Image (spheres, rainbow, N blue to C red):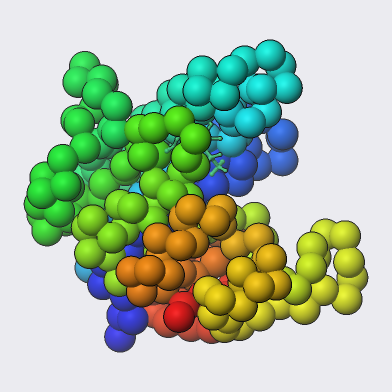
Amino acid sequence: MLKYKRILLKLSGEALAGNQKFGISSDVLDNFARQLKEVHDLGVELAIVIGGGNIFRGIAGQEQGFDRATGDTLGILATIMNAIALQNSIEKMGVPTRVLTAVQMPEIAEPYIRRRAIRHLEKGRIIILAGGTGNPYFTTDSGGALRALEIGADILAKGTKVNGVYDKDPQKFADAVKYDNISFDETLTKNLKVMDAAALSLCRENDLPVIVFNILEDGNVKRMVNGEEIGTIVKN
Ligand code: UDP
């Protein structure tokens, strides 16, 4: 039994780099694509929002002397590069996909049009929504929350390199404790890093649950859509 029928899966750009610090690992891409095909074959409607941190982040760009909006534009373009790469990997497995961009580049991909995105899902295509929100000063977490609401997704699933939300950084503290469930309010009062504040408040105000899970562990996307207890669920 599927727990979630239509999901918005936010894939971190950082995870795409694999063991390297930078760029696109074709092994990771193929692993993502395999996992996506697996749940697509179960009849799940899949919309993907992909990050760009493996290539460029606006905030990091500021340290190199870029103004923020310019750095963010480079970040937005990075997400589109990742989207095109992911599309290639998914289509190699025979699953039809469409890339829809928040900034127009019609020679490469369709513009994002909400009703068209929904139509693609209904026709069984995986959609990859690239370019975040299309605006600087935002992140792809906000893009993910926004698109999840627009397409009426059952959940915003955040696939990252860590397997959930902890009370402190598990990479620094051996005694860090993972939450299985937590409320939006609690993540805010405890200042836990689930997503940026803009993305979190969109989800909280519109009652959209979020699940944070480790996408690098094979089979986790399927476990997530089946409602198995993985990662952390954040809701009101
Ligand atoms: N970005 C932006 N507006 C958006 C989405 C992304 O300006 O709506 C830029 C921003 O500079 C961000 C970069 O694109 O740092 C890459 O996205 P993100 O950091 O969210 O990727 P991830 O953390 O998932 O790798």
Numbered circles on residues, count = 0
Q: Residue at position x 51%, y 18% from top?
A: 70
Q: Quadrant of residue 135?
A: top left
Q: Is residue 106 above or below residue 96?
A: above
Please provide percent x and percent y for residue 154.
Answer: 30, 71
Residue 43 left/right relative to 176: left
Q: Residue at position x 68%, y 14% from top?
A: 65
Residue 169 visible to the viewer: yes
| Residue sitting nearer the eye, 147 or 11 | 147
- Quarter of the rendering occupied by the C terminus: bottom left
Please provide percent x and percent y for residue 25.
Answer: 59, 35
Q: Is residue 32 above or below residue 132?
A: below
Q: Quadrant of residue 88?
A: top left
Residue 134 left/right relative to 150: right
Q: Is residue 75 above or below residue 234?
A: above
Please provide percent x and percent y for residue 145.
Answer: 38, 56
Residue 50 left/right relative to 42: right
Residue 230 visible to the viewer: no
Q: Residue at position x 77%, y 78% from top?
A: 177
Q: Quadrant of residue 99?
A: top left
Q: Residue at position x 66%, y 73% from top?
A: 189
Please provide percent x and percent y for residue 195.
Answer: 56, 57
- Quarter of the rendering occupied by the N terminus: bottom left
